[in-house]
Amino acid sequence: GESVGLHLPTLSVQEGDNSIINCAYSNSASDYFIWYKQESGKGPQFIIDIRSNMDKRQGQRVTVLLNKTVKHLSLQIAATQPGDSAVYFCAEKENTDKLIFGTGTRLQVFP
Amino acid sequence: GEEVAQTPKHLVRGEGQKAKLYCAPIKGHSYVFWYQQVLKNEFKFLISFQNENVFDETGMPKERFSAKCLPNSPCSLEIQATKLEDSAVYFCASSQWDTDTQYFGPGTRLTVL
């Protein structure tokens, strides 16, 4: 079936460096994509979203890039901080508006 | 409220016992979604509601699982006879419109012994 997946299960970066988390999706009909951050023992926290009519969207220290040609989604975090340590999930939205999540990437930030 | 609220935070049941989880969506949100997360991994969609009406139940196990969203009451997810494999964290999310961002609650951790 259709699925959303992640290339790297764990990403380790030094504080202050930029982080890039990648995601591949398979449903070319999906028109809405979201990145969530999940800290231990908490629910997913919305970070940023993007619709399929856009290629790039920027937030505070975060940027999401969408490449529909290769069905690829990425999350860029600028100047990564210890508080950014968490598991990051990409998700796509289907017609019935349920979210299809990827398996998650753990981001570890070292001082 | 301004956050999705879920109760209880933790729930422990013996195999075969009933489990009932509650969710209060953000005030003004018309859509409620339930997801199951096993082993801190992927999220599995269970069911969604538009107000008190089932919107999509394609993820709900046919047996043992049921859910409701009644007016002026928290939404609920009930498992009639729990099994070991039901152990997971159950998340509720709500959104204002069907195309809007889904905001998640803190989850209920269900442990079946």
Image: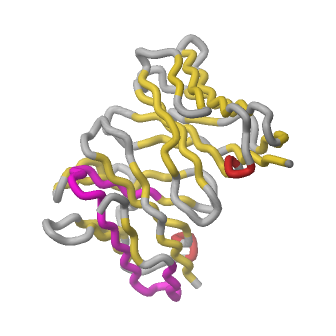
Residue B59 x %, y %: 39, 52
Eyeballing the image, is B106 above or below B110?
above
Q: Is residue B25 left or right of residue B8?
A: left
Please give the name of the residue rendered at 55% of the width and 20% of the height, measured from the top-left corner. Answer: A66
Eyeballing the image, is B13 above or below A35?
below
Q: Quadrant of residue A88?
A: top right
Q: Is residue B30 left or right of residue A5?
A: left
Image color mode: secondary structure
Residue A52 x %, y %: 43, 19
B62 and B52: which one is in front?
A: B52
Please give the name of the residue rendered at 49% of the width and 26% of the height, measured from the top-left corner. Answer: A27
**How many tags in the picture?**
0
Please give the name of the residue rendered at 17% of the width and 67% of the height, measured from the top-left corner. Answer: B70
A107 and B56: which one is in front?
A: A107
Residue B33: in magenta span: yes
Residue A28: in magenta span: no
Q: Is residue A13 left or right of residue B6?
A: right
Please give the name of the residue rendered at 34% of the width and 72% of the height, measured from the top-left corner. Answer: B22
Residue A19 x %, y %: 73, 33
A109 and A75: which one is in front?
A: A109
Kindly give the residue lying farthest to the top in the view shown: A69
Residue B85 x %, y %: 56, 70
Q: Quadrant of residue A64?
A: top right
Kindly give the residue lying farthest to the left in the view shown: B71
Eyeballing the image, is A96 above or below A31?
below
In this picture, which residue range is highlighted in magenta? B10-35
